[in-house]
Amino acid sequence: MRIPSIVLLQRTPPQNENKVPFKEQLPLRLKNRVSGKGGSESDVACLHEMSVLFACMKGADFNESACSKEITSLKKCYKTFLDTKKQKKAEDKTGNVVVGRNLNYKQLNKYLRSYPNPE
């Protein structure tokens, strides 16, 4: 089978890396601090339990006595959510860096102050 010359002309050879100059747009180093803008998390607490409760309430014509089991499970889930949130806030306030957990911006800034970039 013969390859037409048009197909060979359409293929461009790879560019030579030595002929392409590197232009630095931004400095290739980290800043000495992190902004806290992207650190806000949207915690959705007990979504599954809430949907089960609403389904039960809809089936029971919004009679709360028929859905007492679902109400207690929602309250229990929300209490554990508040406890873990309070515990996490207390850990973040101490400033201790916990290995294996995502750090918030305050902990990152404290860590980056220990190792600043040379100017």
Image (cartoon, rainbow, N blue to C red):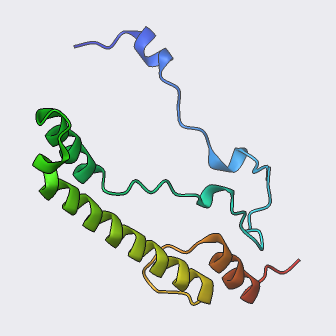
Decide if residue 80 is on the left or right side of residue 114: left
Up-down: is 106 above or below 11?
below
In this rendered view, identify the residue nearer to me: 88 or 75: 75
Query: In the rendered view of the protein, which quadrant contains the C terminus?
Result: bottom right
Up-down: is 114 above or below 28?
below
In this rendered view, identify the residue nearer to me: 6 or 31: 31
Find residue 48 and report its horizontal and vertical position in percent. Answer: 24, 50
Query: In the rendered view of the protein, which quadrant contains the N terminus?
Result: top left
Q: Is residue 84 visible?
A: yes
Residue at screen point 20% across, 37% down = 62
Residue at screen point 57% across, 90% down = 96
Find residue 32 and report its horizontal and vertical position in percent. Answer: 78, 74
Up-down: is 41 above or below 17?
below
User: Farthest residue toward the right?
Assistant: 119
Up-down: is 37 above or below 106?
above
Q: Is residue 95 visible?
A: no
Decide if residue 118 is on the left or right side of residue 38: right
Residue 73 lies in quadrant? bottom left
Find residue 30 and report its horizontal and vertical position in percent. Answer: 72, 68
Decide if residue 69 is on the left or right side of residue 85: left
Find residue 31 and report its horizontal and vertical position in percent. Answer: 77, 68
In this rendered view, identify the residue nearer to me: 4 or 102: 102
Residue at screen point 80% across, 49% down = 25
